[in-house]
Amino acid sequence: MIYGEKGVGLIEVLVALLVLAIGVLGFVVLQARAVEATGESAKRVQAMNIARDIAERIRANRDGWAEYKTQFATTAKQKDGSKDCLGTASTDFCTEAELADYDAREVEKYAASLGMNLSIQQCQKNRASDFDRQCVYIAWNDTTASNSATDSDTACTKGTTYQTKSNCLIMEIYQ
């Protein structure tokens, strides 16, 4: 063995461990991004289910359309909430407005349990030929379910464009 080659094997092992550590670190980062993407995907599925639920409730109670728009104008804030339309006796039916109030309360409660907020607003670029086209905004994390005319980073959209850092889903509904 040559005198200058002492410890070369140890250096080779250390370099191999360094290369292995970099590879493992890359895998850990990749795994963390996959978990993050899975969580975001789950939120989008939940938001889509809430939006569909709202659309189906409106479809079932078409005469309550104006009340739904009022209930969800900015965020779901029910004006009454005193009547339970699901548990009412057959002789005490809910009116269209009471059913809309009940639906809004139920959907808002479910959305809040998932950490989401929602609203129904006039869709952007609404033309006269679009009749009464509304958009259901569902937002989560630090995003508000709204359209902003300013550069607010917390709104879903600014005019007709999505905010880049928003976490929301928008679905069009028609009467």
Image (cartoon, rainbow, N blue to C red):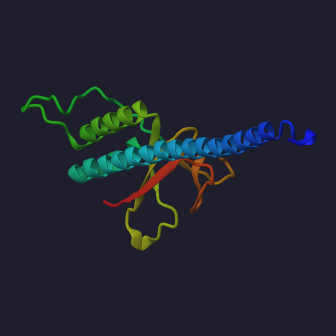
* Residue 173 % position (x, y): 36, 58
Of 100 and 2, nearer the camera is 2
Q: Outermost residue, bottom direction?
A: 129
Q: Quadrant of the C terminus?
A: bottom left
Where, by quadrant of the figure, is residue 21 drawn? top right
Displayed quadrant of residue 160 = bottom right
Relative side of 52 to 114, left or right: left
How many numbered marks have been drawn onto this rendered protein structure?
A: 0
Q: Residue furthest left?
A: 91
Vertical order, 166 against 92 (above or below): below
Measured from the top left, where is residue 131 in percent x and y?
A: 37, 67
Q: Quadrant of the N terminus?
A: top right
Position in image of residue 154 (x %, y %)? 62, 44
Q: Residue furthest top?
A: 82
Write the residue at 39% across / 48% down: 45
Q: Residue furthest right?
A: 4
x and y percentages locating residue 41 in the rendered image:
45, 48
Q: Is residue 73 visible?
A: no
Does residue 107 appear left or right of residue 40 in this picture?
left
Q: Nearer the viewer, residue 30 or 85?
A: 30
Can residue 173 be seen in this snapshot?
A: yes
| Residue closer to the observer: 87 or 28 | 28
Q: Residue at x 28, y 35 (%)?
A: 102
Instruction: Residue at 46% x, 71% y: name it.
Output: 127
Which residue occupies the foreground of this view, 170 or 125? 170
